[in-house]
Image (tube, rainbow, N blue to C red):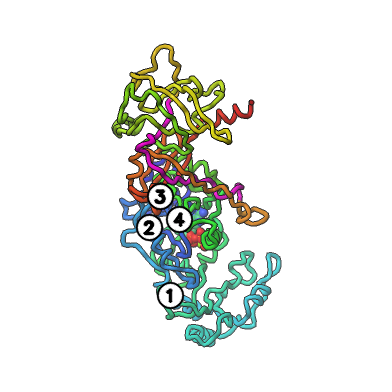
Amino acid sequence: MSDSPKLDFIREIIADDLATGKHSTTITRFPPEPNGYLHIGHAKSICLNFGIAQENAASGAKCHLRFDDTNPEKEETEYVESIKADVKWLGFDWGNDLYFASNYFQFFYDSAVHLIKAGKAYVDHQSLEEMRANRGNLTTPGTPSAFRDRSVEENIDLFARMKAGEFKEGECVLRAKIDLASPNMTLRDPVIYRIMYAHHHNTGDAWCIYPLYDFAHPLEDALEHITHSLCTLEFENNRPLYDWFIENCPVPSRPRQIEFARLNLNYTVMSKRKLLQLVQENHVSGWDDPRLPTISGLRRRGYPAAAIVHFCKRVGITKFKGTTDFSLLEFDVRDFLNHSAPRRMAVLDPVKVVLANWSAEPLTSVEVPNHPQQPEMGNRNVPISNEVWIEREDFMEFPEKKFYRLGPDRYVRLKGGHIIRCAGFEKDASGNISLIRAEILPGTVGVDSPEGVECRAAIHWVDVASGADAEVRIYDRLFNVEDPDAAEGGFLSVINPDSLKMVAAKVEPSLANEVKEFSCQFERVGYFVADSKDHQQGTRPVFNRTVGLRDTWAKLSASNARGR
Ligand code: ATP
Ligand code: MG
């Protein structure tokens, strides 16, 4: 059973069905079409379907992974592999229940013949335009096709000839004969088979007629004995059609379709068509670009799978159409990383500090905790010597009131090391600080600041001698507006030109030797992950910013800047 106290409406229905004995267990499915990579919206559906199976495992519940590969035109095996990898990465397992709808082509065909024999399907030679024109509208019933009342024998013959390749694409289709006057337009004799001379990744050239989604999907569910077929709200209208096919085809079970609201997130797009366009037109580096809401992109960005699953749980399952704030997802990511990510030091905008009196108490390293609240994560020794890099913003020539870091004649602590005092600085030709001169206060490592020394902050640093150069990629939202889909000039017109900034950073030596996908917090900067593709252990450190910290300093200096 679910560990959440209150069940969502789908889990309530399921609990009921189990309690009343309508079902002894549940079989759900996640049915992606392999025509793109999965995104965070799919994660919601994965968490729901596989989650229900996990929660009811005691009764033998299962969740199938089914590739809905009935459309030969856009599908590729690369997508099949990526989808499997993403489902696994999220922590779910389909066991032996991996299916391909294309393996059911014969059953779809037989079901169509069954409908024809029952007088419930006919071959129509109207063009798509004619069919559309004759469909009527909400107030006018559809006009019957001249071919609607063909004999069963004639339909059987024509459908067999469609299958045999005797007609050209678009020359005819098979339609279900339902109700041309139905207020539900999906019931006005929907097309269920069309001719397509396309090579299929699984069945090759065995078929030249392919079933339409509305026809195939309920049959797939029924064949697999799916008990609850969970889909998004767009399919609410199609439910009577789904039920009609279940009712009228020779199926072995009766699945129930239930609809829930899809996940929408602001500042991003989720349609596979748009994601594909971003990839194909090189607006991003690929399907796993860390700015995309794809599962592989979020993974490369450093989002923990557990944070995504937790987010999906928190968003919940309802029938309410809404848009979820991207920052909710970021909140979960921070929350997970705050607990699990070890701390390291990196300086993203370095300025050099020379410690003039280093010889007064020269150390070769200092001991720094790997996590401030989790002593079990241990300490590490970070090399240090007479020159260190610090963050440019940790120094102010004319410090503001609440600025407790470095400035002329001021004190600050180097995290884990000495308190230092700024003795002066130099500027370059354009007036930027190019060097800071400072001195250490001997005897201040690991002890409170001495009498008379006001030191209220500790800043991160990287040793000049031993630190490494790293490429750090600062990712921001891919779009400038909350709803890119609604942008007047199209979603491409609102791409954020600053969504990727490359930074030449200095990092503590250990970071250069970390493995790909190593995730940590750069102290006081944010959460970062070693890039899964470009990071080269020992030779080329490349880190992606997963998410920033909620930095009160940034807020403070912004408000100070406004007040000046
Ligand atoms: P298309 O762009 O082709 O409409 P799709 O996103 O519907 O793509 P599918 O591969 O058909 O892609 O989706 C697989 C499953 O994921 C479906 O059951 C679908 O309802 C679900 N799904 C897709 N997008 C979302 C979303 N944003 N929120 C929740 N579930 C989703
Ligand atoms: Mg779909």
The foreground one among 11 and 396 is 396
Badge 3 density bin: few <14, some 14–19, many ≥20, Cα 10 Å? many
- Mark earlier in primary sequence (3, 1): 1
Q: CA distance from mark 1 to mark 2?
A: 26 Å
Q: CA distance from mark 2 to mark 3?
A: 18 Å
Q: Secondary structure at mark 4?
A: loop
The residue pinned by badge 2 equals 85
Badge 4 density bin: few <14, some 14–19, many ≥20, Cα 10 Å? some
Q: CA distance from mark 3 to mark 1?
A: 42 Å
Circles 2 and 3, Cβ within 8 Å, touching? The answer is: no
Against 431, residue 153 (above or below) is below
1 vs 4, front mark: 4
Ligand 1 within 8 Å, label 2 CB: no
Circles 1 and 4, Cβ within 8 Å, touching? The answer is: no
The residue pinned by badge 3 equals 531
Residue type pointed to by label 2: Ala
Q: CA distance from mark 4 to mark 3?
A: 11 Å
Q: CA distance from mark 1 to mark 4?
A: 32 Å
Residue type pointed to by label 3: Asp
2 vs 3, front mark: 3
